[in-house]
Amino acid sequence: MRSWFSLFVGLTLLSLGCGISESPETSEDLRDSATAALVSGASALEGVASTASTQRASRQQVFGDVAHYRFELKVGPGVHDTVTVHRVVKERAPWVPARASRAVFMVHGDAWGFEAAFLSSVGSAHVPADQSIGAYLAQEGVDVWGIDLRWVGVPTDTTDFGFMAGWNLGTHAKDVGTGLLLARTLRLAGGDLGEMNLLAWSRGAMVAYAYLNSEARLPKPLRQVDGFIPVDMAVRHAPQFAQQQQWACERHTALKARRDSGVTEGGLLGPAPGITLQYIGMFAATAPDAPSPLLPDDVFGPGTGRPTNRRAAIVSAAATYALLAPLQPLTPGYHLMAGIPDASGLPGSLTYTSEPYLYEYAQRAAPYQSLNEVVESEAWTCGLNVPYDDHLKRVKVPVLYVGAGGGVGEYGVHSATLLGSTDVTSLVVRDLPTSARALDFGHADLFLANTARQRVWKPILQWVRAH
């Protein structure tokens, strides 16, 4: 009871301007306001949020009256124990966010951090600045927040990854809790009392499920999430999808063996997965017709020779299941972006997303990833015991599941039923029957496709406004 009272008093004082400057005028003011916000609720959320301080804060005008704020938080003792929390929001004036009755906090998945995953249009040479979900929602009056998990900021020249050994889904879940605390407290200081929705894509959805499981142990007044939007991911498979569960078990066995051998960095694409993606994008953008230095001769069949850089990029995006080999894919025909087969039967072009945007997107991948979270994710999907699902039935917030017909799609619907929610809606974006899912709307098309605004982001916005 005492923690409830302490948090209530702290937030009330903050909302009256004690400890947080409602209208900071410099990066230093913003940094100090963020630190005060983190201190205000840390004790009440012990075990659910990381203890943190703000190292740096900044503001950048995106377009029109929309600005992008960044908060670099120290969340642990190590050099790399840092996360970046982002805020994309309309402003009444520079440094003064406009009030918004609805907010969304976004968690990315593998390879791409917040800006590449959810704000990819800003600074793009190939699409308008507002053609990303973060920019779109902010322009529509939603207060958009998000996080870069710890591994996003690890520099390319890093060679010793021992510091990643302790990073897992639980680590990232606590960091999400810290980001939510910062978002809710700064919003309250600005006079915003509206709902906070948690949107999480791909493996980020697993982090979000783990966070909600942890938060469910708290009294309801201390819980930070009012609505949940898991995007294209499954934490458990329905009984009819036993084959996909077995594939997860096989991935888990292979990745666990790698981890048990002492490896702490890597993902489904192997070590330094983001560097591989960066090279795929760079070679395709700069020398599309040259032979790929990344792939061997005849990799796509006898007599096919060495694929070009463009071919390597298109197949990697539109036949991602082949890129994961020898590991089994998440689902049959799984891919990031839908492709159109050519005479060879392999993808020869993209269906919904422009090729230059793909090349640019690939080059924005974070170099490294912590392996432990991938191993734990596969254990969870395999049906093994994990410490992240024992309180899920106590999570009763409204849920909108969004899937891609050629991504995880319908396989992720079952996971939402593991919660205690009664208000559950599913949207699987598809154009083809399930038998043709290898050609349907892809995992990353949800955020990059030319039609994503109408088919994905607008339905999400409508759901947020209705809840």
Image (cartoon, helix red, strand yellow):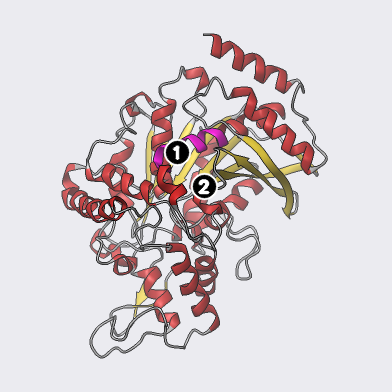
Q: Secondary structure at mark 2?
A: helix
The CA distance from mark 1 to mark 2 is 9 Å
Report if residue 444 is visible in the image. yes
Of residues 431 and 134, the one nearer the viewer is 134
**In the rendered image, the vertical position of residue 421 relative to residue 451, given as above or below:** above
Measured as percent of width and height from the top left, residue 140 is found at: 63, 46
Residue range corresponding to the magenta coloring:
167-179
Q: Secondary structure at mark 1?
A: helix
Crowding at mark 1 (Cα within 10 Å: few <14, some 14-19, many 20+): many
Q: Are the residues flagged by discs 1 and 2 in contact, CB closer than 8 Å? A: yes
**In the rendered image, the vertical position of residue 312 relative to residue 232, given as above or below:** below
Report if residue 353 is visible in the image. no
Of residues 138 and 384, the one nearer the viewer is 384
Give the residue drawn at x 59%, y 34%.
52
Residue 97 vs residue 138: left or right?
Answer: right
Of residues 302 and 92, the one nearer the viewer is 302
Extreme residue toward the top, this view: 1
Measured as percent of width and height from the top left, residue 196 is found at: 55, 33
Q: Quadrant of residue 122?
A: bottom right
Crowding at mark 2 (Cα within 10 Å: few <14, some 14-19, many 20+): many
The reply to whether the magenta stretch includes residue 137 is: no
Measured as percent of width and height from the top left, residue 128 is found at: 64, 64
Residue under label 1: 171
Residue under label 2: 150
Of residues 313 and 195, the one nearer the viewer is 313
Amino acid type at image mark 1: Thr
Give the residue drawn at x 46%, y 63%.
274
